Amino acid sequence: MARSRWREFWCDVVSEKVQIRLRRPGGFGQPQGYFVQCNQTECQYVDENKPPCPLSVGMFSDEIRALEEARQQRTAEEF
């Protein structure tokens, strides 16, 4: 997956603007799928994407759809 661009997002948990981006876990034994990475390393919910964290992969549904379509096209071209 190409690196996703950072986006600004107002986070109610830390009460300030944060930077977020779509990521995929890397490596063996990691969960599959996507998660939303936040630049607030001091937040106790960083990389959790579970309440009360307001971040969810649904915020990137258009980007995920485009990535999945591109992956399907690459797979089809290989055969």
Image (cartoon, rainbow, N blue to C red):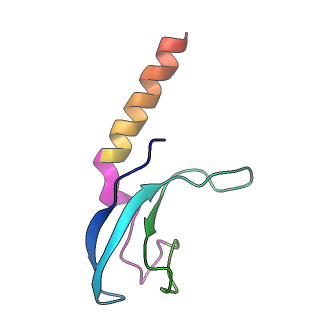
Left or right of 59 in this view: 45: right
Which of the 4 quarters of the picture holds residue 72?
top left
Left or right of 44 in this view: 31: right
Residue 52 pos. (x, y %): 42, 84
Left or right of 71 in this view: 32: right
Which of the 4 quarters of the picture holds residue 39?
bottom left
Report the residue that reaches farthest toward the right.
29
Q: Is residue 79 above or below residue 54?
A: above
Residue 48 within the segment the image draws in magenta: no
Residue 56 pos. (x, y %): 39, 65
Which of the 4 quarters of the picture holds residue 19?
bottom left
Residue 36 pos. (x, y %): 43, 63
**Residue nearer the viewer, 39 or 67:** 39
Residue 47 pos. (x, y %): 52, 71
Q: Is residue 40 above or below residue 64?
A: below
Report the residue that reaches farthest toward the top.
79
Q: Which residue lies at the image location 59% right of the left edge and 55% below the top edge?
A: 25
Q: Is residue 69 above or below residue 20?
A: above
Q: Which residue lies at the image location 63% right of the left edge and 52% below the top edge?
A: 26
Q: Which residues are magenta?
A: 49-62
